[in-house]
Image (cartoon, coloured by chain):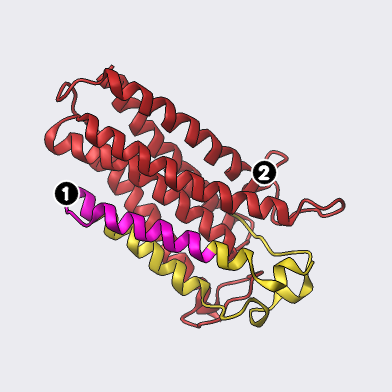
Chain colours: A red, B yellow
Amino acid sequence: VARLYLLAVTLNVWVLVGILAAAFAVQFWSGEPPCPLCVTQRIALMLIALGPLHILLRVYSEGLTRRAAALGQGMAIIAAMLGTVAAGRQILLHILPGDPGFGSPVFGLHLYTWCFIAFSAQIVASAVLLITTGWLEHGKARGRLTMVTATAFAFVVTANLISVVAEAGLHWNLPADPSGYLMFR
Amino acid sequence: LGKNTYAASADRRTSDARGTGIEPMIYGAFMLLVLLILVASSREHVLELPLFCITVLFSLAYLIADMTNPLTLSF
């Protein structure tokens, strides 16, 4: 159970890193800089990942404990709720009939809609993992990919940080509908 | 996550219409906080959880402030 649990937690982080990387790819591929609400959703994704990463880092140092597992999943659920609010708000902004939505749709849905689905799925996944905490035994497993996972996450967050600063261009103002990177203008 | 806008209102297409317009700076700070939390977590620092709570609360507060902007409610 412990190994399966750690595999699920590691996969959880990689899925989140994948979503952030995909959003980053769309940003440059389609030439669509993220708006403030989009950035909020990215921050929520990052905050979610901190939950499972908390578990992995604790496992790395002291082995798997129920306390770390419960704390990590709780962090993920709270952050996912924040993301659900942000994504839900963006969906509602474009819910009127005739509104084409904003940004390029991916597989028929806008990115904020995909995000809403991802946040909802995260809440369910974290709740299920939280339930399995009762069957975990202390110190039975060790995370093997912890440092690689944490490094990949830190890389994605740093890339987003640079992107946001480039978008703002060290100016205080940024349009709600950004069309480029003020840093390079 | 991609290009968005607050579409229905043309007013919102300008930074001035959104009030202070310091979102990127704030969001950059939030991302710095995320990195700080990661470092705190890796070092098992006691500030990990407080920093996480502060980041979530400030993000939520900022989101609520944006949601209750009169310009948003007007369309």
Location of residue A81 with respect to B56 vertically, above or below: above
Where, quadrant-wise, is the C terminus of chain A in this rendering?
bottom right
| Residue A88 at x, y percent in the picture | 63, 49
| Magenta portion: prevailing SS class | helix
In depth, the one of A136 and A31 nearer the eye is A136
In which image quadrant can residue A68 be found? top left
| Residue A126 at x, y percent in the picture | 42, 32
**Marks 1 and 2 on same chain:** no
State which region is magenta: B40-62
Tell me which residue sits at (52%, 49%) in the image.
A83
Residue B44, numbered circle? 1
Location of residue A111 with respect to A10 vertically, above or below: below
**As drawn, is A123 to the left or to the right of A60?**
right
**What type is the residue that disc 2 sits on?**
Val
Tell whether position B43 is magenta: yes
Q: How many marks?
A: 2
The answer for which chain carries disc 2 is A
Where, quadrant-wise, is the N terminus of chain A in this rendering?
top left
In depth, the one of A137 and B70 nearer the eye is B70
| Residue B62 at x, y percent in the picture | 51, 66
Q: Which residue is mark 2?
A: A106
Tell me which residue sits at (26%, 37%) in the image.
A55
Tell me which residue sits at (48%, 44%) in the image.
A80
In which image quadrant can residue A9 be found? top left
Tell me which residue sits at (29%, 27%) in the image.
A6
